[in-house]
Amino acid sequence: MGDLDICFICHRGDRPTPVESVCQCTWLKVHRSCLSSWQLVNAGSKQESHCRFCDGRLPDWRSAHTGRPMAEPVMSVVFDGQIHQIKVSGGIDGKAAFEADIRRIFRLSADDELSLTFGCRVPGSVEAQELTLEGWGSFDAAVHCAALNAGARGEMVQTPPGKRSSKRRAMGTPSRVLRRLFTSNEDCRADERTNERTN
């Protein structure tokens, strides 16, 4: 392995998966899984699809998860001490339906500004790594993560009892894709206090 054969993101070598060049920056190599996580963190911005250095188009981060099981995505919203589970779908219509559900749950009018923060588990992470997705631009990415994580939970449930415990330890406790959804900093603090009382 050469001195430059390390991942630009995690700073590790080509184990367990190889590092590769994915754009015009031949000096920049990454693990495809690390790149996928980087793009996911930047969902909704230009860096989700383009290199920050050469501006070349990057592979779709979803391709790194091809073959993983998927299931109907459900997001959970905590408000006023209650957990609301919402079935979601991507695209313009899915986003509009989700916004309508959120405005109903939060009792917001059409004139009230709505900003979103999604907390999701990195798809395929063995240590239950979590990240935060900011804003409406990341909605489709959050839905895709929800579908992947729902598929992983379904696969875990179908695992034979004798093998389930080791897989559960590896994956960690299943987490909801939507951890926080606020309209202001006060909502954020109120939600955190609610979580502290109920956890």
Image (spheres, rainbow, N blue to C red):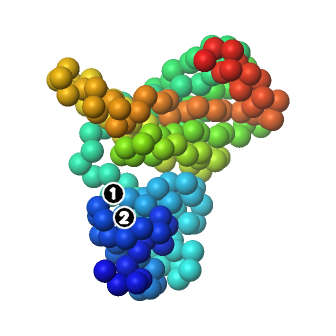
Residue 132, visible in the rendered structure: yes
Dot 2 surroundings within 10 Å: few (below 14), some, or many (20 or more)?
many
Hey, which residue is sitting farthest right in the picture?
186
Seen at 66% across and 39% down, the residue is: 116
Seen at 72% across and 37% down, the residue is: 114
Dot 1 surroundings within 10 Å: few (below 14), some, or many (20 or more)?
some
3D distance between C-alphas at marks 2 and 1: 6 Å
Q: Are marks 2 and 1 in contact (CB under 8 Å)?
A: yes
Residue 109, visible in the rendered structure: no
Which label sits on residue 32?
2
Q: Amino acid at mark 2?
A: Arg
Which numbered disc, 2 or 1, marks the residue closer to the eye?
A: 2
Quadrant in which the N terminus appears: bottom left
Locate residue 6 relative to residue 111 in the image: left or right: left
Work out whether 32 lies above or below 53: above
Seen at 81% across and 35% down, the residue is: 185
Locate residue 161 relative to residue 149 in the image: left or right: left
Q: Position of residue 13 (x, y in %)?
A: 37, 70
Q: Amino acid at mark 1?
A: Ala
Q: Position of residue 3 (x, y in %)?
A: 40, 84
Q: Quadrant of residue 148?
A: top left
Question: Considering depth in this image, is 192 or 103 the residue closer to the camera?
Answer: 192
Say which element carries label 1: helix
Locate residue 122 relative to residue 44 in the image: left or right: left
Question: Considering depth in this image, is 55 or 64 the residue closer to the camera?
Answer: 64
Q: Quadrant of residue 74?
A: top left
Return the disc, 2 or 1, that comes first in the chain's sequence.
2
Seen at 75% across and 31% down, the residue is: 188
Say which element carries label 2: helix
Q: Quadrant of residue 102?
A: top right
Label 1 belongs to which residue? 64
